Amino acid sequence: MLSPQVIAVSLLSLTLVTAQDCPPLPDTGVVMGEPVPMHPEHIPSGCSAYEILVARGTSEPNYEAGGGKFGIVVGDPVVSNTTVKLPGARGYPVQYPASAEIITGTRQGARDVVNRLIAQSIACPRQTFSLVGYSQGAGVMHAAAKDIPIALYPRIKSLVMFGDGYHRLGDVLSRFPVGLNSKVKQVCAPGDPVCDPNATNCTFFHLTYIRPSYINPAVDFIVKGFTG
Ligand SMILES: *[C@@H]1O[C@H](CO)[C@@H](O)[C@H](O)[C@H]1NC(C)=O
Ligand SMILES: *[C@@H]1O[C@H](CO)[C@@H](O)[C@H](O)[C@H]1NC(C)=O
Ligand SMILES: *[C@@H]1O[C@H](CO)[C@@H](O)[C@H](O)[C@H]1NC(C)=O
């Protein structure tokens, strides 16, 4: 089993690959479909000005060497870079297993998102939120959005989906509820078969969101949503 640090390096080292090639997946040692251990002790307590709820991708481990809690490919770089630009921001790891049990996991994750939004909104009247989902986690956010009370929409400043399977299905099916949809940024790597309708079946591109060319614009979008 390689360390998450090695995973990060092996993914980043392939930044020159374009959608015409299909490189082999790096040997990360991650068994796809295995649940990721949940860490309730990573749930932040009290209030913060800005909270980013992150639903990780399937079996996506944390960047443990860097103290990551949200997923090495998307959540960890998004939260750490947003926090640098916007002190007062923090992440919340959506409590769901991100395993191959997608139907039950999505339901569990969506309930956790809605419960967190309601509880924090009551406890912290000035707190605002961003919703970030990667891969299966994007499905979690789609499911959660259906159940988020409309009264809380003004608190949700942005939604950013990476490798969102709904995106592949086209505009109509990937839409979030009216009142949230205008705050959505879709990040889809060309060639990612999960979200790009023109992609072949090269899974490699689904793992490339760790690249700064995807993370940096997402971070800017989140910061702007919170402060704009
Ligand atoms: C897919 O390919 C079609 C035809 O080449 C093109 O018009 C469309 O913009 C492409 N869609 C995406 C998401 O790249
Ligand atoms: C899908 O992947 C298989 C094995 O990786 C490959 O042989 C096949 O050509 C690919 N199909 C398409 C449509 O890209
Ligand atoms: C995070 O921010 C630093 C400093 O701006 C930047 O160098 C780095 O590329 C960013 N990380 C990612 C994954 O975008």
Image (cartoon, rainbow, N blue to C red):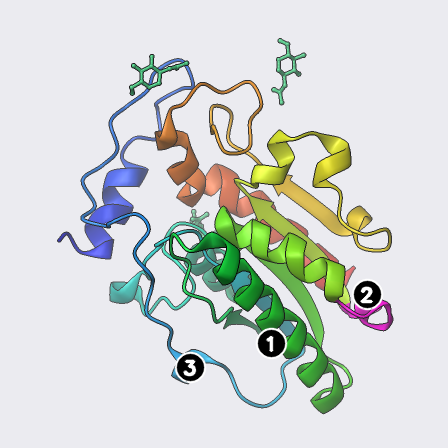
Depth order, front residue of 188/80: 188
Question: Mark 3 or 1, which is nearer the eye?
Answer: 3
Three-letter amino acid code at the position of disc 1: Gly
Residue 3 occupies quadrant: bottom left
| Residue labelled with disc 3 | 40
Q: Residue furthest left?
A: 1
Quarter the C terminus occupies: bottom right
Q: Earlier in the sequence, mark 1 or mark 2?
A: 1
On screen, residue 154 versus residue 48, left or right, reads right
Question: Marks 3 and 2, Cα distance to the nearest angstrom?
Answer: 26 Å
Residue type at the position of mark 3: Pro
Residue at which label 2 appears: 153
Is residue 124 at least partly visible in the picture? yes
From the viewer's perspective, is 211 left or right of 155? left
Q: Residue under label 1, please give it.
A: 88
SS of the residue under disc 1? loop
Looking at the image, residue 89 sits to the left or right of residue 20; the answer is right
Dominant secondary structure, magenta? helix
Asked if the residue under mark 2 is in contact with the one under mark 3, i.e. CB atoms within 8 Å, the reply is no
Residue appearing at x 79%, y 48% in the figure = 181
Residue 10: in magenta span: no
Q: Is the CB atom of the residue marked by disc 3 within 8 angstroms of ligand 3's nearest atom?
A: no
Decide: is 208 above or below 179: above
| Residue at image location 58% in from the left, 73% down from the top | 112
- The correct choice, above or below, for 196 with respect to 33 in the image is above
- Depth check: 165 or 84 in front? 165
Residue at the image point whose x is 81% and y is 52% from the top:
177
Instruction: Decide: few, some or many residues near mark 2? Use Cα within 10 Å; few <14, some 14-19, many ≥20.
Output: some
Picture layout, residue 214 above or below residue 98:
above
Q: Position of residue 50 (x, y in %)?
A: 65, 73
- Residue range (magenta): 148-155
